[in-house]
Amino acid sequence: MIKVMSFNIRYGLADDGENHWNHRRSLALARIHAFGPDLIGFQECRDDAQADFVRLGLPDHHFLGIHREGPGDTALEMAPLLFRRPAFRLLDAGWFWLSETPEIPGSMSWGSAYPRTVSWARLACQPTGAELTYVNTHFDYEPAAIDGDARCLQQWLDQRDPRTPLILTGDFNADKDSSAYCLLTGAGGLIDAFRQVHPPEEDDATFHAYDRQEEMAPLDWILVSSHFRVLDAQIDRTRQGHLFPSDHYPITAVLDWKA
């Protein structure tokens, strides 16, 4: 069994008033511990005191992330992935940028607002040795860039060995009627973990902009290859009054290997 979480934690410098990172960081960490993920994909995690807090609060997890680069303070943002050391052994890892030149750090294409990265790791489950590839990302929010990001990611996925199980987490900045979703779950062959166990008409919004109902959208997905059976998938909507863990709800999935 593998427990997976995707969580956009909202960058720590955001001027969010009562929901500033310094106020909500303990709640965010508490929600992670409440689920106890083996694999975590973060988005908007700055490599400063914010990432230090995450690393300190998750000592059993190995942290892999790279600065997205680009101009200004946002260059320190990462879309890191973490895996629980007792559960996995690292075989290989890397990063690339979602652009027409993915090997060039900080590169941008398709009118994107910021550079965007993909982090990946090839892992061996302990103690069985079964291998999987875990991928985490954060797409841009410009419409043309979302489509370009999806194509770039799918091209990378197409190059991997299809026999290797895959888990993909991310904030895709798109809903489930988008061409990006259709590409990854259609031709890409990946399964939406949440939709696998919940009917399509059920509310699957993860972005809420601190309880602004008109902004709610299902931007965060956990997608898996057909090697896995989805035992459970949930959106954690826990809050403390007007205090939220982030402007996104974390999304979780519990997976098992198919025979």
Image: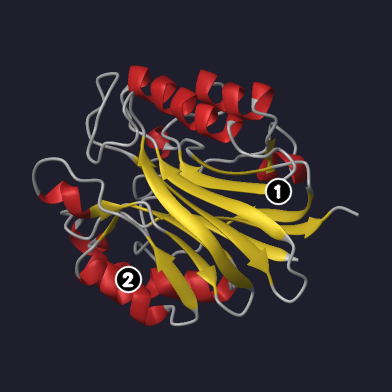
The relative height of residue 211 versus residue 5 in the rendered view (above or below) is above
For label 1, count other residues whose C-alpha is less than 10 Å away and answer few (under 14), some (14-19) or many (20+). Answer: some
- Compute the Cα span from label 2 to label 1: 33 Å
Q: Residue at x 62, y 71 (%)?
A: 88
The numbered mark at residue 233 is none
**Count of residue discs:** 2
Q: Position of residue 110 (x, y in %)?
A: 29, 18
- Tell me which amino acid carries mark 1: Pro
Q: Residue at x 15, y 40 (%)?
A: 70
- Tell me which amino acid carries mark 2: Arg
Residue occupied by mark 1: 165
Q: Dividing the picture into quarters, in which one does residue 130 lie?
A: bottom right
Observer-nearest of 13 and 63: 63
Q: Is residue 240 visible?
A: no
Circle 2 or circle 1, nearest the eye: 1
SS state under label 1: loop
Quarter of the figure that contains the C terminus: bottom right
For label 2, count other residues whose C-alpha is less than 10 Å away and answer few (under 14), some (14-19) or many (20+). Answer: many
Observer-nearest of 149 and 205: 149
- Coloring applied to the structure: secondary structure
Q: Is residue 4 visible?
A: yes
Q: Residue at x 39, y 35 (%)?
A: 139
SS state under label 2: helix
Residue occupied by mark 2: 25
Q: Position of residue 29 (x, y in %)?
A: 42, 73
Mark found first going from the N terminus, 2 or 1: 2
Q: Position of residue 34 (x, y in %)?
A: 56, 75
Q: Residue furthest right?
A: 259
Quarter of the figure that contains the N terminus: bottom right
The relative height of residue 155 versus residue 219 in the rendered view (above or below) is above
Q: Position of residue 101 (x, y in %)?
A: 31, 28
